[in-house]
Amino acid sequence: MTTSLCTCKACNHGICAQRVSIFSSLDEKQLIKITDLITHKEYKKGELLVMEGEAMDSLVILNGGQVKAFRTTQDGREQILHIFSEGDFFGERNLLRDHPSAYSIEALEDVHVCLIHKREFQKLIKEYPDIALKVMEELCERLDRLENTVEAMGTRPVEARVSSVLLEFADKYGKPHPKGTMIELPLSREGIAHYIGLTRETVSRKMSLLQEEGILEMVGNKRVLLLDRKALERAVE
Amino acid sequence: MTTSLCTCKACNHGICAQRVSIFSSLDEKQLIKITDLITHKEYKKGELLVMEGEAMDSLVILNGGQVKAFRTTQDGREQILHIFSEGDFFGERNLLRDHPSAYSIEALEDVHVCLIHKREFQKLIKEYPDIALKVMEELCERLDRLENTVEAMGTRPVEARVSSVLLEFADKYGKPHPKGTMIELPLSREGIAHYIGLTRETVSRKMSLLQEEGILEMVGNKRVLLLDRKALERAVE
DNA sequence: CGGGCACTTGATAGTAATCAAGTCCGGTGG
DNA sequence: CCACCGGACTTGATTACTATCAAGTGCCCG
């Protein structure tokens, strides 16, 4: 999955589509055809790719970097709904149903995206039904994750929710380390708070607690060394 | 949509599949073919259709009555994730990915379901890609609703969350009434609480408040007369 | 190396959970 | 049809927890 990355600036080797799971059922010839339909775009950290309520005319495939999908309430509170990483896509719902975007998308770091225009995407789906099945699979994953989030927000004590996010990040962004797992946090404390419906102070306090308990070690502000995964898993239940 | 209901006990007129949106793209001949694949089952109010963690071998289409999809935590707390009504289906995710069920399903009233076996469903999806698109549409709707729930649970004050559920029920189950809209509540106070992550007492108190404000009127325990929809909509924001 | 921003920590206040009685609804049986 | 019973609902008092407000500290980038 992470091998043979396309490192060229504009993906003109014709292989970047290969890395996206929704196209995994296609053969090389078909992939090259698709690559011709793709246009590219770059965003800097902090830039908005999409604004809530805006119409979308393309499927967006993340080809490097991470973004957050979030909503802002009238009184300025933010709720993060999804974090998308390399290989993920978004906009599919707006293309399928012709709705405006239900959330804003902001680059968490410098980001490179591939765009497939609405009419091409709709043609592709008709032509290769397997693509629809792959999209469906991805929608199912998101449903699973959101259901877990709802359950956590509805029934779990705050400490369990923090633990749960840390486990999610460990699985997605963790790298082996002699003392456990090193996690590159995609979000600041405030970001984590907005992901699970808390305030930055509460997240801070709970993470300090976890550190005192010897479960993890904070390494600067952007990394966490997970020492005792089992303990974290117990905290989630 | 609600016309020409199949009121026979076992749906042997061969038209019950017609009422399900996922088959709406098929013609009558195809529908009759599908009807042959369907088996039927009845459940009484309170019965479990599916247990969390159980393997599923069929797509379940609700042909009458309502059910709730929920999870129970180790310490006995319940979180309701979905409410399914006539025409809705579930189990699709387990069939597509061969996972055990992520939640239990309980009949909220006497229920009649149609079952399509896994192997038939998978054949149908291959044969009629439009069905996959319809399933996808439905998954999108559920994602939308869950995203709204997460946003509400993360950023909205409790009163707004209660108002939000009442509006949802008004749209789904409300009937015109000289003084406003009469809502048949699918859930008890406790059920509503478990749907939005609160306790029954809190739901009770907030609904009493809404009644004092003249926004609604409780009619017995199972119905609510919504008097001032606009006010409720304002409370959600 | 310095400055700004993110993070931590502490004190206080507000809100919902919990605990605890009562009341009312709704179904059942006479 | 009415009376009764049990479960669901309401209401009140108290407790627990997290948001908020406020200050200080430390990380990270230029």
Image (tube, coloured by chain):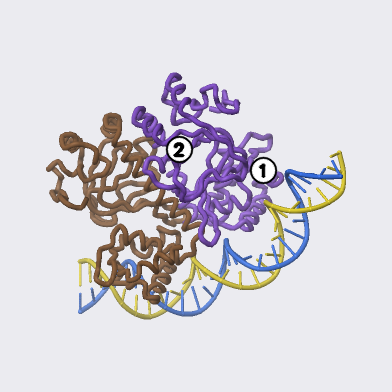
Chain colours: A brown, B purple, C blue, D yellow
> What's the residue type where badge 1 is placed?
Arg
Of callouts 1 and 2, which one flags the residue occurring earlier in the amino acid sequence?
2
> Which class describes the residues within 10 Å of circle 1: few (<14), some (14-19), or many (20+)?
some
Examine the rendered structure and indicate whether residue A5 appears above or below residue B140: below
- Residue A220 appears at what percent x and percent y? 29, 72
Q: Please tell me which residue is depicted at 66% across the width and 46% down the height of the picture.
A: B216
Residue in the foreground of this view, choosing between A155 and B89: B89
Residue B140 position, x and y percent, is 41, 40
Q: Is residue B237 visible?
A: no
- Residue linked to disc 2: B58
Going by the image, does B16 lie left or right of A92? right
Task: Locate residue A96 relative to residue B112 in the image: left or right.
Answer: left
**Residue at position x 56%, y 38% from top?**
B172
Q: Chain of mark 2?
A: B
- x and y percent of residue A236 in the render? 43, 63
* Subunit bearing disc 1: B
Q: Is residue B89 above or below residue A1?
A: above
Pinpoint residue A168: horizontal percent, then vertical percent. 35, 59
Q: Amino acid at mark 2?
A: Ser
